[in-house]
Image (spheres, rainbow, N blue to C red):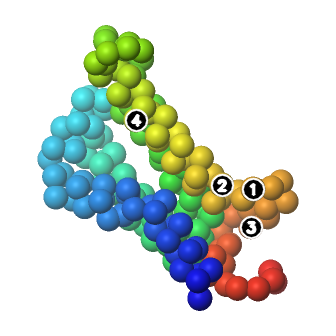
Amino acid sequence: MLPILLAILARLLLVLLFFPFSALDKALNFSLATQQAQAQAGNPRLARLLIVCGLGVEVFMSLGVLTGVADRLAALVLALYCIVTAVLWKQFWREPDFGLVGVSNGREVFWDFLKNLAVAGGFLMLAFGASASSAQAFLDAPFASSRPYRLGGSS
């Protein structure tokens, strides 16, 4: 029972940022999220589409990771989502005050950028595993479940 609880906890901690918190924030503050996306996208319709797509990714891929339904593919999608959001919304290189010492908004954005990449790494580990053979297993059957809550040998 303890190994199953640990597996659930690890997956829950990995998706907790997205489901429920970020998804709920997007739903409750949709117009604000759209305004922020519009600053990058330029077009209000595109901004709304991006927020709706992000909401879908955060909810459905997180549920896939938690339930084990196509969990490795869901983890891959979330990893790509983290990388894309880091590049689009955590642009530390555009901050005029990037500094290594003292108060620096650029450095704060840099840390957020790195955190996004670190979370992406966690999802990539979940998607591909820790070995070449587990990565090959994903490539052979990307829609398969990793059966995360099963005890015992593989079959």
Q: Amino acid at mark 2?
A: Met
CA gap, disc 1 and disc 4: 25 Å
- In the image, what residue type sits under mark 1? Ala
**Marker disc for residue 125:** 2
Q: What residue sits 58% from the left and 73% below the top?
A: 7
- Asked whether the beta carbons under mark 1 and mark 4 sit within 8 Å of each other, the answer is no
Please name the residue shown 58% across and 52% down the image.
Answer: 122
Q: Which element carries disc 3, helix, strand or loop? A: loop
The answer to the question of whether label 1 and label 2 lie on touching residues, with beta carbons closer than 8 A, is: yes
Which mark sits nearer the N-terminus, 1 or 4?
A: 4
Dot 4: element: helix
* Residue that label 1 marks: 130
Does the residue at mark 3 contact the one at mark 4 (Cβ under 8 Å)? no
Q: Nearer the viewer, mark 3 or mark 2?
A: 2
Residue tagged 3: 141
Q: Position of residue 62 (x, y in %)?
A: 45, 65
For residue 68, above or below residue 79: below
Q: Is residue 71 visible?
A: yes
